Image (tube, helix red, strand yellow):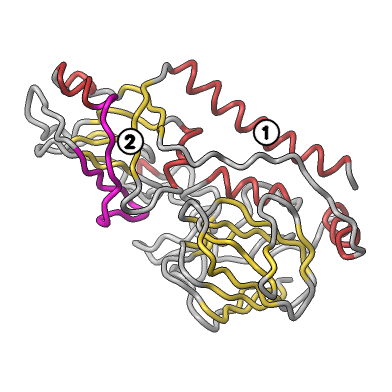
Amino acid sequence: MSTPLLHIEQCGFLTSLQDTGRKGYLQYGVSKGGAMDQYAAELANTLVGNTTSQAVLEITQSPHRFRVLKDTVVAFTGGGLQPQINDVSIPLLQPQFVSAGTVISCKQPLPGFRLYMAVAGGFAAEQFLGSSSTDLLLTAGGLNGRTLKKEDVLEQRNKRSPLQQSLLNVLKAGAAIELPVKPVAHTTIIRVLQGPEWHFLTAEANTLFSNSSFTVTANSNRMGYRIKGIALPANRSCNIISSPVTQGTVQLTDAGEMILLMADAQTVGGYPRIAQVCAADLSLLAQKKPTDTIQFQIVSLQEAEELYVQQQNELKKTAGILQSKL
C-alpha cells in the first residue's frame, strides 16, 4: 500500500512524475513521453535499488523545496540544480539517507537544466497505457496528468526490497557508500545519424550542418526544441508526406530552420527528417536550456550502437556494485 513520502512546499515550473515512457502506442498517435533525460532517470533509480522503470521526479531548473515525511533513501542525477539540506549540498550520483522531517531545497543552479530525484520504492503515480509518465497534452498519468504544485503530497509506490532496507540501514548508521559513477559531460557536441531525408540538403547545407553552432531558442519545450542558427538551404520543397518521427528526430522547415523533437514529440511529421540524434546523446540534449549552443557531429550506425550499449552497461555495472556492497 502506498504511504505518504514527500510534501511539496515550493514547486517551480514544469516539474512532473516521469518514467521510461509508453511503448507500443506510436501507431495510435500516442507519444512515448517519459523522462527527457532517460539515462539520468534510470541511473537515479539504479542508485536507490529500484528497477529502472520506476517513476521519478523530473525537476526543471527553478526553486523547489520538499519535506520528507518518512525515512528514505534518495538519489539525484542530471543537472540544473544543487539539492541541499540546511544549506549543505547533497552529492549527486550517490544514494543518500534522508530522515523523516528533513527539508530538501533546490535553488542553487548547476550546469544542465533537469534534475532527477528517485526514492527507494519509487513514487506512486497514475498508470496510463502501461506507464506512470505524465502526459501533459492528454492530461494522463503521473499526478492527475499535470505538473506538480505547492502542497502536493507524493507517495511511495512499493515496499522497500531487502536490498533497499539494507541500503537504508547502512546509510542511516552513518556509513558511506560511494559508487564509481561518472557525471555526464556537459559538452556542446551532439552526435547524430544522417536521416532518411538527408539528401534534401544542398552540398553547402551538408557542410554548414556539421561545421556551425546552433542555439536552443526560448520556443522550446518537452515536445521539441526550436534551433536557431544559419539557415540550411534545401534542394527541394520541405513539405513532404507525413512520416514517422521520434525523440531525437531533426526536422528541416521551409525557412531552413531546424526543429529537434524531444520526449513528448508527435508520432508523425511533415518536414524532412535530415538527422537523428544518437540514443546515447539524448541525455546531453535533454540538459540543454534556451540560449545554450549545440554542434552536430555525424557518426555511423555502428558508433551510435556502441555508445548506447556502453551507456546501458554502465547502468548494469552500477547496479552490480551496489549489490556487492550490501
Tell me the quarter of the picture where residue 85 sits. bottom right
Residue that badge 2 annotates: 249
Cα–Cα span, label 1 and label 2: 25 Å
Q: Residue 107: percent from the left, percent from the top? A: 53, 69
Residue drawn at 82 percent across, 56 percent down: 164
Decide if residue 4 is in sight here: no
Give, as a three-letter code, the residue at label 2: Thr
- What is the span of residues highlighted in magenta in the rendered image? 209-229
The residue carrying pointer 1 sits among few (fewer than 14), some (14 to 19) or many (20 or more) residues within 10 Å by Cα, namely: some
Tell me the quarter of the picture where residue 198 sits. top left
Label tally: 2
Q: Is residue 43 left or right of residue 235?
A: right
Which image quarter holds the N terminus?
bottom right
Q: Is residue 286 left or right of residue 50?
A: left
> Which element type, helix, strand or loop, lies under badge 1?
helix
> Which element type, helix, strand or loop, lies under badge 2?
strand
Tell me the quarter of the picture where residue 306 sits. top right
Residue that badge 1 annotates: 314
Decide if residue 168 is in sight here: yes
Residue drawn at 25 percent across, 56 percent down: 219
Q: Residue 138: percent from the left, percent from the top? A: 36, 62
Q: Is residue 167 magenta?
A: no
